[in-house]
Image (cartoon, grey):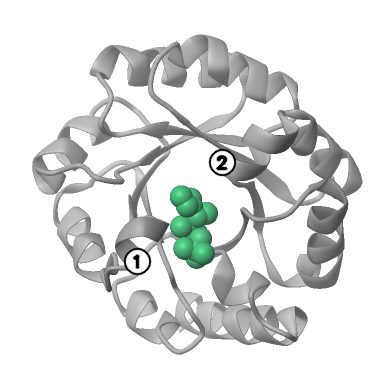
Amino acid sequence: MKLQLALDLVNIPEAKEVVNEVQEHVDIVEIGTPVVINEGLRAVKEIKEAFPSLQVLADLKIMDAGAYEVMKASEAGADIITVLGATDDATIKGAVEEAKKQGTQILVDMINVKDLEQRAYEVDALGVDYICVHTGYDLQAAGENPFEQLQAIKRVVKNAKTAVAGGIKLDTLPEVIQSQPDLVIVGGGITGQEDKKAVATQMQRLIKQETFA
Ligand SMILES: O=C(CO)[C@H](O)[C@H](O)COP(=O)(O)O
């Protein structure tokens, strides 16, 4: 089980500062969609150059032109690129083929997918690397979380790794871990804390305990 730090509400210098603080305690750094909108793929490039030992995920949430956008993100240094599960199979297939050429990976974000188990089953057959359940900020504000959705995709996904994102905090991490995702994605649960390093350290400890139990 791996831990991904999601950076959404920062510029590039602030992103570097946060990663610098927690780098020993996370496996993957996500350049969030708002950061890509504000700073472009330069943010991916600069973080990868500054922290070459960490994997970098570009949260592009691709909906069309899968191959082209995966090519551009891969060239910028991304190791993993996100595509939306709500899009059509052709876009996901194009993304997967291009990622294979580039030596990168595809994470499919299932945000707002209605028939979750059916779509997860279909997406799993397209050769993607990760399938991620995700409660976005707007539904988190309405009190929703992705925990039951994680259990639902675990029932049908046989090939891809499973991931979970959306408002995970130190106190809810044990519940998430119980469902055994391969990847736990945490944004505000780390970046919104006074002592980010201490929280990331505790999260890593919980994840490692479970991984090696
Ligand atoms: O992709 C995202 C928002 O669309 C976030 O990166 C993801 O939800 C994780 O952040 P948080 O833990 O703060 O919810």
Q: Quadrant of residue 200?
A: bottom right
Whether label 1 lies within 8 Å of ligand 1 gets the answer: yes
Whether label 2 lies within 8 Å of ligand 1 gets the answer: yes
Q: Quadrant of residue 123?
A: top left
Residue carrying label 2: 33
> In this orientation, does residue 68 appear?
yes
Instruction: Give coordinates of residue 141: x percent, y percent.
Output: 35, 68
Point 29% across, 69% down: residue:
145
| 143 lies left or right of 182 | left
Q: Is residue 141 above or below residue 208?
A: above
Rendered image: mark on residue 184: none
Residue carrying label 1: 140
How far apart are the two marked residues, 1 and 2, measured between alpha carbons? 17 Å
Which of marks 2 and 1 precedes in the sequence? 2
**Is disc 2 surrounded by few (<14), some (14 to 19) or many (20+) residues within 10 Å?**
some
- Does dot 2 land on a helix, a strand or a loop? helix
> In this orientation, does residue 185 appear?
no
Amino acid type, label 2: Thr
| 107 lies left or right of 195 | left
| 177 lies left or right of 56 | left
Point 29% across, 44% down: residue:
110
Point 35% across, 21% down: residue:
92
Q: Is residue 38 above or below residue 23?
A: above
**Is disc 1 surrounded by few (<14), some (14 to 19) or many (20+) residues within 10 Å?**
some
Q: Quadrant of the C terminus?
A: bottom left
Amino acid type, label 1: Gln
- Does dot 1 land on a helix, a strand or a loop? helix
Instruction: Give coordinates of residue 117: x percent, y percent.
Output: 12, 47
Q: Is residue 98 above or below residue 202?
A: above
